Amino acid sequence: MWVLKSGGRWQDLPERYPSPATCWRRLKEWTERGIMVKTWERLLKSLDRQKRLNWSQAMGDGTFSPAKKGAPRLVRPRKAKERNSC
């Protein structure tokens, strides 16, 4: 959560946290097990009950997500360059 809130890099984690590699592995595991989605849902429900969310201003941003299979390609991949003989 510190990385998401601060926008900092994994290697900038404060010393009170485990190593960046450990934190990243735990996030990966929790994501794969669905724990992060459940946590996010519980947080949103709690904030909504407290009337601390303005849903008219809510948005989702998936610009960081990779395109799924079958997504249209905007740019053709480059061909591998031949090695220069010099």
Image (spheres, grey):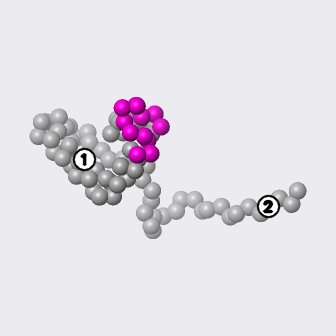
Q: Residues within 10 Å of mark 1 (few under 14, many from 20)?
A: few
**81 lies above or below 19:** below
Question: Is residue 63 shown to the viewer in this render?
Answer: no
Q: Residue at x 42, y 34 (%)?
A: 13
Q: Residue at x 13, y 36 (%)?
A: 51
Residue type (three-letter) at the residue carrying disc 2: Arg
Residue nearer the viewer, 19 or 78: 19
Q: Secondary structure at mark 2?
A: loop
Where in the figure is residue 50, as x and y percent of width and height? 12, 36
Tell me the quarter of the image containing the C terminus: bottom right
Residue 42 located left or right of residue 1: left
Dot 2 corresponds to which residue?
Answer: 83
Residue nearer the viewer, 10 or 48: 10
Where in the figure is residue 71, as x and y percent of width and height? 45, 64
Where in the figure is residue 11, as x and y percent of width and height? 47, 37
* Most distant residue in the left direction: 49
Residue 84 located left or right of residue 41: right
Q: Residue at x 33, y 39 (%)?
A: 1
Q: Secondary structure at mark 1?
A: helix
User: How many numbered marks are there?
Assistant: 2
Q: CA distance from mark 1 to mark 2?
A: 50 Å
Residue nearer the viewer, 24 or 50: 24
Dot 1 corresponds to which residue?
Answer: 40
Q: Residues within 10 Å of mark 2 (few under 14, many from 20)?
A: few
Q: Residue at x 77, y 63 (%)?
A: 82
**29 lies above or below 12:** below
- Mark found first going from the N terminus, 1 or 2: 1
**69 lies above or below 48:** below
Q: Quadrant of residue 33?
A: bottom left
Residue type (three-letter) at the residue carrying disc 1: Trp
Magenta-tinted stretch: 11-22
